Amino acid sequence: MRTVMIGEDRVPAVGQGTWQLGTDRRRRHQEVEALRYGIEQGLTVIDTAEMYANGGAEEVVADAIDGIDQPVFLVSKVWPTNQAPERLRRSLEATLKRLRRPQIDLYLLHWPSRSVNLRDALTGLTQAFRDGLTRYVGVSNFPTAALQEAQALMPPDVPLVVDQVEYHLLNRRAETQLIPYANRHGVTLMAYSPLKFLAHLDPQDPRYQVLQQLADKRQVEPATVALAYLLGAGPVIAIPKAISKAHIDANSQALALELSADERRALQAQFPVPNEDLPFQAL
């Protein structure tokens, strides 16, 4: 099984996302069962955020992990307007209450903030770590230069262990600077929306065709191939969201699939990488 390090923890290289979970209570049972099924398949890293359904996704996660035997690695994120130290503390305490846990495994700044100075946001993150509310801290949507700036502001004993960014075959910008930098500095890249747009590719599109050809050769789904590509790019963990068992199975199979150099080059030829880093965007 492919794994990555988050801090000192070794975790599966495919987890589960929760964007849009918790928006409709009529789907609660289905969402809870999907997360539980994913955990059974080895997808034990679960990513959520206070912004998702205004905390509703965190409540779904709490129901999903209630009473299960497998250890899970929980990730959540604080919204930019809540990143001042006192508000960050209140946000994290509310997250823990919704998750029904005394501590979270990893807490991230969701985006760079327009309204809160980065130093102040990182001060609040550091205090949460030192108070034992979170085991690890990190950032999300920080391109390379912003990640470097954030690292320089952190005390040596409180490393930023993760940068969560959009990364998929149709957006390979993370490969230009961020992944090489992360690999050199002990930061794990967490790829959100790792299958974005792939389901909408036309079957006549050469990009779809190369994915399907590789999937047929390996006797897996195209989504499995797409995820396996990302996992081979460096210290990367992908967090796709899935509700159906078939999609969860396809995601989990990427843990056992390692593409050859020729297969990776075939994908790279059809999904070229832009010669630019991820854009900086503050919210």
Image: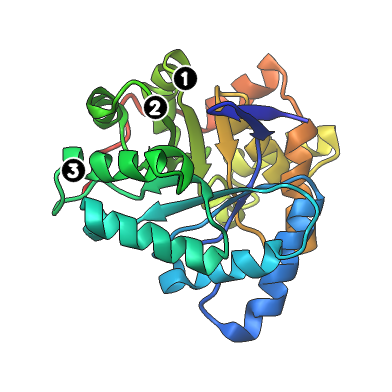
Q: Position of residue 169 (x, y in %)?
A: 53, 37
- Nearer the camera: disc 2 or disc 1: 2
Quarter occupied by the N terminus: top right
Q: Residue at x 45, y 59 (%)?
A: 49
Q: Position of residue 177 (x, y in %)?
A: 36, 21
**Mark 2 or mark 1, earlier in chain:** 2
Q: Is residue 1 above or below residue 201?
A: above
Q: Secondary structure at mark 2?
A: loop
Q: Is residue 69 above or below residue 217?
A: below
Label 2–label 1 contact, CB within 8 A: yes
Give the CA distance from mark 1 to mark 3.
23 Å
Q: Is residue 266 visible?
A: yes
Quarter of image, res 32: bottom right
Which residue is disc 2 drawn over?
159
Disc ID at residue 186:
1
Q: Secondary structure at mark 1?
A: loop
Give the CA distance from mark 2 to mark 1.
9 Å
**Mark 2 or mark 3, earlier in chain:** 3
Label 2–label 3 contact, CB within 8 A: no
Q: Amino acid at mark 3?
A: Asp
User: From the viewer's perspective, is 198 left or right of 118?
Assistant: right
**Mark 1 or mark 3, earlier in chain:** 3
Q: Position of residue 223 (x, y in %)?
A: 68, 46
Q: Is residue 280 above or below residue 181?
A: below
| Category of crowding for the residue at label 2, using alpha-carbon neighbours closer than 10 angstroms: few (below 14), some (14–19), many (at least 20) | some
- Nearer the camera: disc 1 or disc 3: 3
